[in-house]
């Protein structure tokens, strides 16, 4: 509860920080006459606020799917991108850029739609290959993910090397995480999907708790392991795919936020899902605010900030709290 | 009711509400605002667009430029609205523009769409070839009510180019290798405006048609292309050092006529790397490299 209040306070504070100083009073006193321009209002309401809401949605999605993947794969190195979602989405995005399409569906550009399709397609492919290895399912899944990732990365490199330089530029920004303000409708739908995904993950968190003690224990208690895994996997993958299609590839959030929260608050998934979602949102909103202002008047891709700020911060947490950590 | 059904129905309600609200909003918002008759606050998002605006005498009406707009020098005093690749939408809005001029490249098309959604007027221009430049000058002239100035500017450039071409025999083509970057080696291909500038200067690209606009090439192609002249554009502050480096680098290709006859030039990148109203100055610089005998000074 208090974490939610912190999120709202952070979002409000960040909306007042930016390259252009704005006055809150001027922004809220909107005159309806179309001739009088009110840049304060437009910057705050039409540019900054949508972007901050987007950052919160994406941060929550990546962080909570990170928790799910770490629980599923029994691997502390797992993050939302480990099973090839990132390279699949990246490949989709670069194909969209190269093809030069210019239509939109529900306000989404071809890049977003191709990235989403690429992410979902890759996840399905990895899941399919991983399933067919049967006995060592999770190891098979991981290996399939790593190899598919490497293969698609090679395709991305190939396409960038034959592409026009301005197209390459556009793709590189996307690959490093490119936040921008989105239409109200996109934010509404995105928020709905991500919130539903977090609630779904919360529903199965007791089963994930048992699963983290080992498959045999879980089976003895009478938990349907395959169903739990399939649900967690599908929900986390979809949430990641949506996040990626909204803002490009933002690394690190899905790795360090779950670990940070786990180190500080303990490994209970019932508590972990809501908390990581909120902390992930706070983290990405803050990182994006830094990205907006640090090289003003230009902007940094937010993925750079998450890595630079997140890496050292996580190491400090690791040293301080590692005594009570259980992965 | 099962908690999963409850979640699903809430989710569907939320999505449905989203469609309903956005339909209601869409029917309210009107179409894009048309171009103003006489824009008074113009923001330019590319250095060559800034040069066109200043050449048309719109210097006082230009309120925002990108950080790389450094010509004419007074342009650097204008408000900065981000870089060419990463324009900052907040800074553009804060400049209170009534016309935003952008290039037709991915990032800028995207910015123009976002600005239109809020209600700003944007003009997108494609300037990739010499012909595009003249069209762009005319379009900006129309949009800013400077048709005469635009006509004069375009015809002035064309006249100067024409008189330059009278100085030499155009059928005698000199093969030029245009080096964009040395390590790894990258040169200008045929499908570029640099290629057009080389041809206007009475030269010919030593590299044949390629897939890339600026193809990376190997030592083999360098030797095979038998360039008569090698040109490297560089920033003005490091011209001497780059010239030293160029002589050293190219000395290993002794069989290339340009190296043999010591015809390796490092020129200022300013006028030859952006397609703007200083097109003639750029072509003249190239002509000086190709036919130094025409310019005794």
Image (tube, coloured by chain):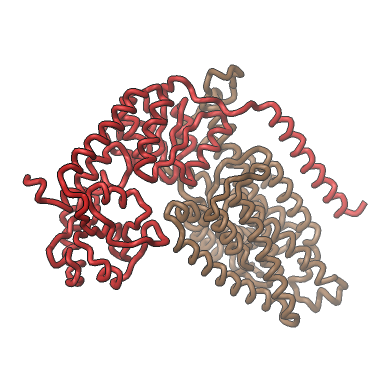
Chain colours: A brown, B red
Q: Residue furthest bottom?
A: A135
Image position of B248 (left or right of A200) = left
Image position of A38 (left or right of B76): right
Nearer the observer, A5 or B30: B30
In the displayed image of the protein, which residue is found farthest to the left? B296
Residue at the far right in the pictured view: B1
Q: B100 and A54: which one is in front?
A: B100
**A205 over B108 or under it: above or below:** below
Place of residue A100 in the rendered image (x, y in percent of width and height, measured from the top left): 54, 51
The residue depicted at 55 percent of the width and 71 percent of the height is A150
* Any part of residue A185 in sight: yes
Q: Compare residues A215 and B53 and report the one nearer the observer.
A: B53
Residue at coordinates 66% horizontally, 37% vertically from top-left?
A184
The picture quadrant where one finds residue B220 is bottom left
Q: Quadrant of residue B240?
A: bottom left
Task: State the image coordinates of residue B69 (x, y, percent, origin top left).
Answer: 33, 38
**Is A66 situated above or below B44?**
below
Examine the rendering and report whether any part of residue A280 can be seen.
no
Identified at 61% across, 56% down, the residue is A115
B89 to the left or right of B1: left
In the picture, residue A79 is in which quadrant?
Answer: bottom right
Q: Residue B61, percent across and down?
A: 37, 24
Residue B148, how many percent across, how many down?
A: 33, 23
Q: Quadrant of the image for the C terminus of chain B?
A: top left
């Amino acid at each position: 509860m208090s974490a939610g209040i912190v999120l709202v306070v952070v979002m409000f504070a960040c909306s007042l920080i930016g390259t252009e100083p704005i006055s809150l009073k001027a922004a809220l006193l909107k005159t309806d006459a179309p001739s009088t321009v009110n840049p304060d209002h437009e910057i705050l309401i039409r540019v900054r606020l949508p972007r901050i809401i987007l950052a919160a949605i994406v941060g929550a999605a990546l962080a909570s799917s990170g928790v799910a993947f770490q629980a599923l794969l029994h691997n502390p190195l797992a993050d939302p991108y480990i099973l090839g979602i990132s390279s699949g989405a990246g490949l989709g995005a670069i194909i969209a850029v190269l093809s030069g399409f210019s239509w939109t569906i529900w306000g989404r550009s071809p890049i977003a739609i191709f990235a989403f399709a690429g992410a979902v397609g890759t996840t399905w492919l990895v899941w399919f290959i991983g399933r067919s290895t049967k006995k060592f399912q999770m190891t098979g899944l991981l290996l399939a993910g790593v190899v598919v990732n490497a293969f698609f990365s090679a395709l991305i490199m190939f396409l960038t090397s034959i592409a026009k330089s301005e197209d390459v530029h556009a793709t590189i920004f996307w690959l490093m995480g490119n936040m921008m303000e989105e239409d109200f409708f996109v934010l509404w739908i995105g928020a709905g999907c991500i919130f539903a995904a977090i609630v779904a993950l919360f529903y199965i968190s007791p089963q994930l708790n048992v699963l983290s003690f080992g498959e045999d224990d879980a089976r003895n208690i009478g938990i349907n392991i395959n169903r739990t895994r399939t649900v967690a996997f599908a929900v986390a993958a979809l949430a990641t795919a949506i996040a990626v299609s909204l803002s490009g590839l933002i690394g690190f959030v899905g790795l360090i936020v779950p670990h940070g929260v786990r180190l500080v608050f303990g490994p209970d998934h019932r508590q972990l899902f809501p908390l990581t979602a909120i902390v992930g949102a706070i983290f990405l909103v803050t990182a994006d605010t830094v990205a907006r202002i640090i090289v003003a008047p230009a902007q940094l891709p937010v993925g750079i900030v998450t890595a630079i700020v997140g890496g050292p911060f996580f190491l400090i947490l690791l040293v301080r709290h590692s005594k009570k950590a259980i992965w | 009711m099962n908690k999963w059904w409850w979640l699903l129905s809430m989710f569907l309600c939320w999505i449905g509400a989203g469609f309903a609200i956005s339909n209601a909003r869409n029917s309210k918002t009107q179409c894009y605002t048309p171009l103003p008759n006489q824009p008074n606050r113009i923001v330019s998002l590319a250095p060559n667009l800034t040069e066109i605006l200043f050449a048309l005498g719109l210097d006082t009406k230009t309120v925002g430029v990108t950080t790389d707009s450094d010509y004419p020098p007074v342009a650097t005093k204008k408000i900065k609205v981000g870089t060419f690749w990463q324009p900052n939408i907040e800074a553009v809005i804060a400049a209170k523009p009534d016309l935003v001029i952008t290039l037709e490249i991915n990032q800028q098309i995207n910015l123009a769409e976002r600005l239109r959604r809020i209600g700003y007027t944007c003009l997108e221009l494609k300037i990739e070839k010499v012909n595009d430049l003249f069209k762009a000058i005319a379009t900006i002239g129309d949009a800013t009510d400077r048709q005469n100035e635009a006509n004069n500017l375009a015809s002035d450039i064309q006249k100067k180019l024409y008189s330059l071409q009278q100085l030499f025999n155009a059928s005698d083509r000199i093969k030029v290798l245009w080096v964009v970057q040395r390590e790894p080696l990258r040169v200008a291909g045929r499908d570029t405006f640099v290629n057009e500038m080389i041809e206007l200067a009475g030269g010919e690209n030593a590299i044949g048609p390629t897939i890339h606009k600026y193809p990376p090439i190997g030592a083999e192609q360098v030797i095979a292309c038998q360039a008569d002249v090698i040109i490297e554009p560089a920033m003005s502050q490091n011209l001497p050092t780059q010239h030293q480096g160029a002589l050293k680098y190219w000395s290993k290709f002794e069989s290339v006529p340009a190296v043999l006859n010591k015809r390796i030039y490092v020129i200022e990148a300013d006028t030859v790397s952006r397609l703007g109203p200083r097109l003639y100055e750029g072509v003249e610089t190239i002509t000086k490299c190709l036919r130094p005998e025409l310019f005794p000074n």
